[in-house]
Amino acid sequence: MNHLGRWIACGVLIAACGGGKATPKQPDPGPTIDAGVVAEDPEGPADAAEAFLDVTGIQPTTGDAGTEVVIYGSAFTKESRDIEVWFGAKKAEVTDVRDTQMTVIAPKASKGDVVDISITFSPGGKIQLPDAFSYPEED
C-alpha cells in the first residue's frame, strides 16, 4: 500500500471511531416514564428553553416514606425556577437540583398506595407522571 492509501485508511478508521474523541458516559436514567406532556404551561412556553423542559425517568419507582428518589430529565436549571414535587397529595422535599436530575424525599403515604408524581416548575409549567411511585404493602 502506498503512502496515500495508508493516509486514506487511517482517515477512514479515525472517522469511524468518532475522530478519536471520547464520549463521556451518561448516568443510567433508570426506568423510562412516559410523562405524556412536556412543560404543560397554560400560557404556552415563555421561551424556547421551556419547550425542552421534560422528565424522562425516576429511580427507584418503589419505596417507603423517606426514600431518596432521583428524577431524570432536562433543563431543570436552565433558568432560575421554583420547583415543587408532589407524590399524590403530599409534597416531597426537594434536596438537590441539577440540569438533568433532581433528588427528592418520598413523603409519608399509606402502605400499598400507588401515587402520581406531579412536578411544577415556575416558570415552566407542570409535568404529571401517572402511577409513578408505589409504597410497598405491609409485611
Image (cartoon, grey):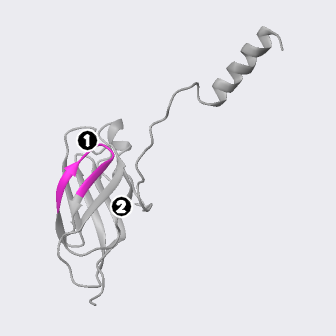
Name the residue rendered at 31%, 50% in the picture.
101
Q: Which residue is mark 2?
A: 58
The part of the image, by quadrant, that contains residue 81 is top left
Count of numbered marks: 2
In x, y percent, where is residue 4? 78, 9
Q: Residues within 10 Å of mark 2 (few under 14, many from 20)?
A: many
The part of the image, by quadrant, that contains residue 49 is top left
**Front tag of 2 and 1:** 2
Q: Secondary structure at mark 1?
A: loop
Q: Which residue is mark 1?
A: 77
Q: Secondary structure at mark 2?
A: strand
Residue stretch rendered in magenta on the structure: 93-103
Instruction: Please state, as top left, top right, bottom left or bottom right, where the C terminus lies in the image.
Output: bottom left
Tag 1: residue type? Thr
Which of these two is toward me, 40 or 57?
A: 57
Instruction: Please state, as top left, top right, bottom left or bottom right, where the N terminus lies in the image.
Output: top right
Name the residue rendered at 31%, 57% in the picture.
71
Residue found at the far right of this picture: 1
Tag 2: residue type? Ile
Structural distance between the alpha carbons of marks 2 and 1:
17 Å
Magenta span: predominant SS is strand
Is residue 83 located in the magenta-colored stretch of the structure?
no
Name the residue rendered at 21%, 68% in the picture.
106
Which label is found at residue 87?
none
Which of these two is toward me, 75 or 7?
A: 7
Sequence-first disc among 2 and 1? 2
